[in-house]
Amino acid sequence: MRRHDVEVIGGLIFFALILAIIIGVAVAKTGTGRIETATVESKERVCDSSRSCRYLIFTDRGVYENTDAWLSLKFDSSDIYGAIKPGRTYRLKVNGWRVEVTSSYPNILSIEGEVTK
């Protein structure tokens, strides 16, 4: 086998491995869907230095983010953010988990309704 062929095969294997990791993480994250009940304490729009922004929702159960999610077919983050009112309790459909190292939070996919206490 020629050196060029070995390099091409090695590159393809590396590409396939990276692709498998990306797909695995995406499937694992979308597969964590669950319903949680939480009382909203506050909410804010947080922007980083690159002018990229996301919505954070602070609750009695922790912090959630509210961002569009292509894999979950969620494209209405601004509408959800506007509907959430501090002091109210909601059933939230969420996926993902809190990863402190990457500053990621469970993502709110939808609000299933206000809960009365």
Image (cartoon, rainbow, N blue to C red):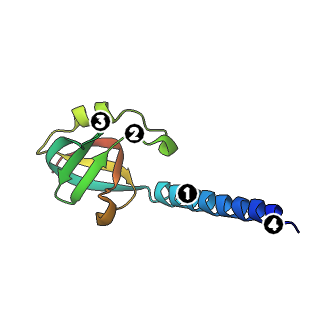
Residue sticking out furthest to the bottom: 1
Query: Splitting the image into 4 quarters, where does residue 63 fall?
Result: bottom left
The nearer-to-camera label among 3 and 2 is: 2
Local crowd at mark 2 within 10 Å, few (<14), some, or many (≥20)? Answer: some
- Mark 3 or mark 1: name the one nearer the start of the chain: 1
Instruction: List x then y, in percent, for residue 112.
Output: 33, 43
Question: Which of the labelled discs sits on residue 80, or is there none?
Answer: 3
Q: Is residue 35 left or right of residue 6?
A: left
- Mark 2 or mark 1: name the one nearer the start of the chain: 1
Instruction: List x then y, in percent, for residue 47.
Output: 23, 41
Front one among 116 and 9 = 9
Q: Is mark 4 on a helix, strand or loop?
A: helix
- Mark 2 or mark 4: name the one nearer the start of the chain: 4
Local crowd at mark 1 within 10 Å, few (<14), some, or many (≥20)? Answer: few
Residue depicted at 18% across the width and 46% down the height: 116
CB-based contact (under 8 Å), mark 3 and mark 1: no
The nearer-to-camera label among 2 and 1 is: 1
Local crowd at mark 3 within 10 Å, few (<14), some, or many (≥20)? Answer: some
- Mark 4 or mark 3: name the one nearer the start of the chain: 4
Residue depicted at 76% across the width and 59% down the height: 8
Residue type at mark 2?
Asp
Q: How far apart are marks 1 and 4 (CA)?
A: 29 Å
Query: Residue at label 4?
Result: 3
Residue type at mark 1?
Ile
Q: In this view, does 79 lie to the left or right of 18?
A: left
